[in-house]
Image (spheres, coloured by chain):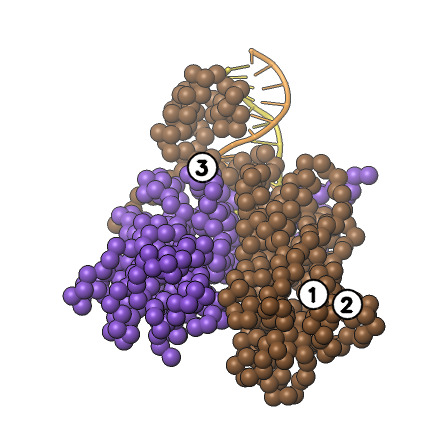
Chain colours: A brown, B purple, C orange, D yellow
DNA sequence: TTGTAAGCGTTATCAA
DNA sequence: TTGATAACGCTTACAA
């Protein structure tokens, strides 16, 4: 038995029911104040009676705007992307735009997908972790405004990020100066993402400014499993260090946990720091020293910038970096 | 200096450039195989040269489908919603649909927003945590297919969820039978969300089937801060219990942490369990006993169901509950 | 295999 | 304050 069909009424039916022209119905919807109160109530009643919902595609086509912005993220694991997305969404809804989400990890043709989206939204916010090429970015940007999140500077496209180099340098300096660490290791792959690159840069800078020379990074993906693997090497003595500056909390969490289990005292024998300040960082023993980024703010900032771009038709290519804060708990050696 | 304008070419310009009709261009885009190879390459070249991207609104209008499904979630904190969303996205992209996301927490008019979306997508997936009324659901469902996630049964609308009652009962039973707990407390508000209601139901069921009578729930929001507050009461002796079945991990995490800090041994004096198995559950000491839900699968299931709804025009109102698994770590008393 | 042309459901311009 | 009506940029019969 076929159920109640999903029937959509058109503006014509509403107009007929209210005894007005479709133009008036349209006005009641977009600029109610310009139509006479009496007509307005009549139209509203008809809309209500018919359960009328205007067709978004037709609206977009006629008005030449989609009331939507696309957000491209690599994935949604961990708090970082979720918070960012949450920031996007709240700022977007503020300006009456919907968020069209796409997750690129594991997708065969990210480029094609982004182009498809470019035809359905008013702007694109693309996280650099998606790995889109500068060429694609340029090409997309020729159609609609594009903002890159957490990426490197780009000639024509605005990039918005949180700060990495400076805070990584402070954190590393803390390990060297306060906790006397002399054999630090950076765990993570600077070529994997622009923000990790920044963190390693800070790591090097802290060494350099103290006349020390920083070792090459211990390249690995920033996930728990890799943290466990590195911990095993350390425990087996195949790797030596008295301090680990990790690319993110996931890595650090796994490292602290496994190191402790295998008898390598953290922070007694070895300091460990993370990045992101996820919830688990607070519940770990010892508490994880890490860096907190204003991720939600970043999301909001991106949308605000987009809304600015949409208004004025010229583009201020002003990169911005949001400040982060170092959170010292016990895993670095602090009490 | 106004920068390069975001210029969009139309199908007419592509047609002209390739020396064909717009119909042929359209075919090259949607059914390339029906056009002659030689024409196809010519058109493709023109598309490429012009950096042509078809207008999504026009496509949707003409083809009468939006290639998009809306997802309404209350918020994006914690792993639950993010994982669900990730599941949605991956299944949706599989069927060539985009995800339009809306977060309802703190929005003035959720109803209006959902109606607006209903006019822009082919289907709606609404999480019951958004708190939409059954009336709104019905009204929306008259326009487009609607699927409710993690909600109560509904006469005409499909509801898809993970299982709660049975697993909560097993978990509670474990505390009673294996760990001899006789003064359990359910922490969380069953009226706040349908799945919490299910968990409390299971809690009661476990008691009832053993001839015990379950206490009223300790109603509170399922967030860390509330966990800390409850812990304070327990520590102060204003509340007594030898076991806590918490509505989620956040609550449980905070509880275990604070209880331990104030000298109340977990699990020695008091067992604590959570729900969700977030990452922090594994890094907590003692490890948190909890329940894992196949959240990602749920997201995928929802989209698959939607795709089914979109194909066949009739609707099987078959509610489904995905099985969960109880994870026993140390916080319940297990070793 | 390709072209012609009629919509698709709005918005917006112009008159009235 | 309202109504005709021409776009908007595509898809899709139907013809050729």
CB of mark 1 within 8 Å of CB of mark 2? Answer: yes
Q: Earlier in the sequence, mark 1 or mark 2?
A: 1
Q: How far apart are the alpha carbons under marks 2 and 3?
A: 50 Å
Label 1 SS: helix
On residue A92, which mark appears? none
Does the rendering let one see residue A24?
yes
Label 3 belongs to which residue? Answer: B109
Residue at 74%, 70% in the rendered image: A177
Residue under mark 3: which chain is it in?
Answer: B
Label 1 belongs to which residue? Answer: A171
Residue under mark 1: which chain is it in?
Answer: A
Q: Is residue A228 left or right of residue B147?
A: right
Q: Nearer the viewer, residue A231 or A209?
A: A209
Q: How far apart are the alpha carbons under marks 1 and 3?
A: 44 Å
Label 2 belongs to which residue? Answer: A206
Q: Is residue A124 left or right of residue B92?
A: right
Q: Is residue B212 left or right of residue A76?
A: left
């Amino acid at each position: 038995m076929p159920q109640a069909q999903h029937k959509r009424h058109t503006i014509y039916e509403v107009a007929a029911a209210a005894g007005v022209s479709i133009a008036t119905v349209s006005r009641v919807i977009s600029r109610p104040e310009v139509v006479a109160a009496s007509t307005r109530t009549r139209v509203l009643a008809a809309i209500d009676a018919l359960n009328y919902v205007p067709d978004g595609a037709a609206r977009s086509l006629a008005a030449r705007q989609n009331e939507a912005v696309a957000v491209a993220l690599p994935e949604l694991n961990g708090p970082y992307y979720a918070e960012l997305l949450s920031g996007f969404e709240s700022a977007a809804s503020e300006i009456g735009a919907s968020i069209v989400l796409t997750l690129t990890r594991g997708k065969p043709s990210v480029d094609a997908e982004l182009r498809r989206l470019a035809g359905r939204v008013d702007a694109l916010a693309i996280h650099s972790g998606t790995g889109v090429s500068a060429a694609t970015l340029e090409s997309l940007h020729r159609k609609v405004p594009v903002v890159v999140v957490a990426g490197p500077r780009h000639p024509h496209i605005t990039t918005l990020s949180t700060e990495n180099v400076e805070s990584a340098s402070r954190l590393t300096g803390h390990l060297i100066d306060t906790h006397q660490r002399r054999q630090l290791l950076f765990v993570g792959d600077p070529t994997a993402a622009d923000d990790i690159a920044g963190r390693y840069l800070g790591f090097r800078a802290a060494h350099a400014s103290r006349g020390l020379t920083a070792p090459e990074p211990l390249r690995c993906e920033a996930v728990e499993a890799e943290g466990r693997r590195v911990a095993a090497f350390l425990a087996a003595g195949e790797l030596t260090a008295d301090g680990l500056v990790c690319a993110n909390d996931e890595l650090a969490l796994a490292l602290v946990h496994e190191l402790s289990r295998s008898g390598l005292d953290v922070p007694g024998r070895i300091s460990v720091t993370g990045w992101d300040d996820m919830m688990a960082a607070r519940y770990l023993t010892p508490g994880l020293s890490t860096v907190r980024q204003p991720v939600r703010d970043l999301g909001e900032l991106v949308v605000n910038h987009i809304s600015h771009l949409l208004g004025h038709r010229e583009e201020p290519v002003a990169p911005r970096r949001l400040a982060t804060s170092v959170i010292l708990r016990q895993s670095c050696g602090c009490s």
